[in-house]
Image (cartoon, helix red, strand yellow):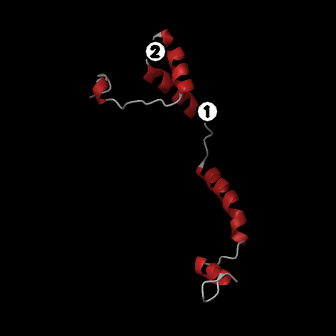
């Protein structure tokens, strides 16, 4: 297949809509003659264009802001924490 030849319907990925509201809206939007796939593609393109575009530096800064509060934790291993909670007989301390 090339860009000029449309892919046959039997080779296209199936679309399953499990939301009654989404199915209703899709039916409403296809009344103008557009296919369901075209309506969905248009909506996804608009959503992708509206999504914020982060630079790698901005992405790293956001992740760092999330992780920074964890730097102050004790850094104990699970075994160390577990040993503090249970005695040698497996009973809580």
Residue 7 visible in image? no
Mark 2: secondary structure: loop
Q: Quadrant of residue 73?
A: bottom right
Residue, x 49% and y 15% (percent of image)? 30
Q: Residue furthest toward the left?
A: 1
Mark 1 or 2: in front is: 2
Q: Is residue 69 visible?
A: yes
Q: Residue at x 63, y 39 (%)?
A: 52
Q: Which residue is mark 2?
A: 34
| Above or below 11: residue 76 | below
> Quick one: label 2, few (<14), some, or many (20+) residues within 10 Å?
few
Q: Is residue 61 above or below residue 44?
A: below
Measured as percent of width and height from the top left, residue 41 is found at: 48, 26
Above or below 43: residue 32: above
Quadrant showing the N terminus: top left
Name the residue rendered at 70%, 58% in the picture: 65
* Lower sequence index among marks 1 and 2: 2
Name the spot of residue 15 as percent of width and height, x first.
42, 30
Choose between 76 and 90: the one closer to the eye. Answer: 90
90 left or right, relative to 14: right
Disc 1 from disc 2: Cα separation: 22 Å
Q: Secondary structure at mark 1?
A: helix
User: Which residue is farthest bottom?
Assistant: 88
List x then y, in percent, for residue 29. 53, 16
Q: Residues within 10 Å of mark 1 (few under 14, many from 20)?
A: few
Q: Quadrant of residue 78?
A: bottom right
Question: At 28% from the left edge and 26% from the top edge, which residue is drawn?
Answer: 10
Name the residue that disc number 1 marks.
Answer: 50
Foreground residue, 42 or 61? 42
Q: Is residue 44 left or right of residue 11?
A: right
Q: Position of residue 63 (x, y in %)?
A: 64, 56
């Amino acid at each position: 297949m090339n860009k000029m030849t449309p892919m046959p319907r039997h080779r296209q990925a199936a679309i399953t809509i499990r939301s009654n509201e989404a199915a209703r809206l899709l039916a409403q939007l296809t009344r103008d003659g557009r296919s369901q796939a075209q309506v969905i593609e248009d909506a996804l393109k608009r959503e992708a264009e509206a999504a914020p575009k982060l630079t790698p530096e901005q992405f790293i800064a956001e992740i760092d802001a999330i992780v920074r509060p964890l730097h102050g934790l004790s850094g104990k291993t699970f075994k160390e924490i577990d040993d503090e909670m249970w005695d040698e007989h497996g009973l809580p301390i």
